[in-house]
Amino acid sequence: MTRTTKDPFQTRKIVTVAIPVPPEESSAAAAPSAPSVPSAPSVPVSSAPGAPSARPSAPTQIPSSGGSRITYGPPSSDSSWVTEGGAADRTTEPELAVPAALGKDRATLTLITGVNAGQVFALDGTDHVIGRGTEADIWVEDGAVSRAHAKVSCRADGVYVVEDLGATNGTFLAGERVAKSRELRSGDRVQLGPNVVLRFAITDDAEEELQRRLYESSTRDALTRVYNRKYFHERLIAEVAYSRRHRVKLSVLMMDVDEFKKLNDAHGHLAGDMVLRVVAAAVNRLIRVEDLLGRWGGEEFVILARSTGRTDAIKLAERIREAVAALTIPIGDGEDVLSVTLSIGVAALADAGDGAGPDELLALADARMYKAKGLGRNRVVSEG
């Protein structure tokens, strides 16, 4: 037997019955002690189909076809409530409607594959080099993308074109390899190598801003605005694979705000939130553009330090620890201030062993962080 699932959002069909208006005499007899109030003239009920039904001032019982009585009336103190179809006699309130000004159209490239899928790049009419190198205007993180892979530029007539810059794995448009330059139309997909696909579009300011917000909300922590755990872990997987393949150094720093629970209990969760925001902002200022800071959970933060060995990672951890310990964080009305410290565990990819993956690297950094807390907090541990 097939079961039919009811749609909870579907409008229920209700049989509308013309409700008679009680005579004024019966209303007066029901409450003889009440002071007399001039009543509005009664509205005659039309029996013609489609005629508006009068609104009851009190629930009225109407005989149904089965012999039982159905009560119609307002479910609450709202006396304007009527059954289906009664809204037809309501008057729309006039308001001045001013059309919203259309934003200026602009060209964008949106990543639709890879770890950073959803990221939006605005094109301002100048030349934009796309590649994996740090000198690229649009930086794409993929091992199969050349350092200077392709270029998107705008001609004098306002038409955008894409040009391959001699990339090893080629640039493709609409499934065909780009030999020289090719014109771009809104909706075209540009493929860089085997993995990266970007969508070219002409959008207005509102649509571009919406795309940016959607990307930010999917990758950033709502409280601290650093990267969230899901995005960080996806990036870590890609970075470990890249470092193994190209024999590049990589380190992870796991950090925990010391005695954060006591701080929350003593000063409240609003003060705790303020501490997390200030600490995240302070740490973010101390890392490089190519590094990654994420909130791992609660009061724990984690840093992915690219092209960084164990020695340099320890130096970075000490700078962060000292900077956070020197913070004075105002709470409440600003008269009270708090100071916090960090316990940091440092793990280089080489420390985790030849066959270690991203989870083993994280576990090693996490174990060293807990060792730092056990040794008295406010310190960096890079061994054990």
Image (cartoon, helix red, strand yellow):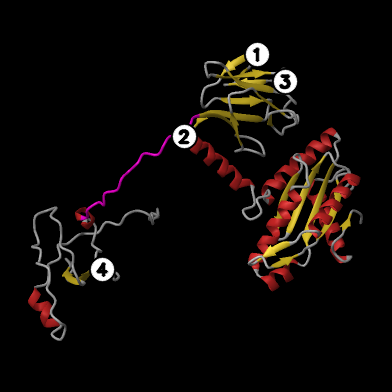
Task: Read off the residue under disc 1.
Answer: 179
The Cα–Cα distance between marks 4 and 2, rounded to whole angstroms, is 46 Å
- Nearest-to-viewer mark from 2 and 3: 2
Secondary structure at numbered mark 3:
loop
Residue 189 at what x, y percent from top left? Answer: 57, 26
Residue bearing mark 3 = 167
Task: Tell whether label 3 touches label 1 (CB within 8 Å).
Answer: no
Q: Is residue 36 left or right of residue 269?
A: left
Disc nearer the start of the sequence (4/2): 4
Q: Residue furthest top?
A: 180
Magenta stretch bounds: 90-105
Q: Disc 4 designates what residue?
A: 74
Residue 258, horizontal then vertical, whole percent:
79, 64
Marked residue nearer the N-terminal end (4 or 1): 4
Question: The C terminus lies in which quarter of the figure?
Answer: bottom right
Quadrant where the N terminus lies?
bottom left
Decide: few, some or many residues near mark 2? Use Cα within 10 Å; few <14, some 14-19, many ≥20. few
Which of 66/244 is in front? Answer: 244
Mark 4 → mark 1, Cα distance in angstroms? 72 Å
In this rendering, position of residue 235 left or right of residue 18: right
Determine the residue positioned at 66% across, 36% down: 114
Q: Amino acid at mark 4?
A: Pro
- Disc 2 vs disc 1: which is toward the camera? 2
Mark 2–mark 3 contact, CB under 8 Å? no
Which disc, if any, is residue 103?
A: 2
Identified by mark 2, the residue type is Gly
**CA–CA distance between discs 4 and 3?**
72 Å
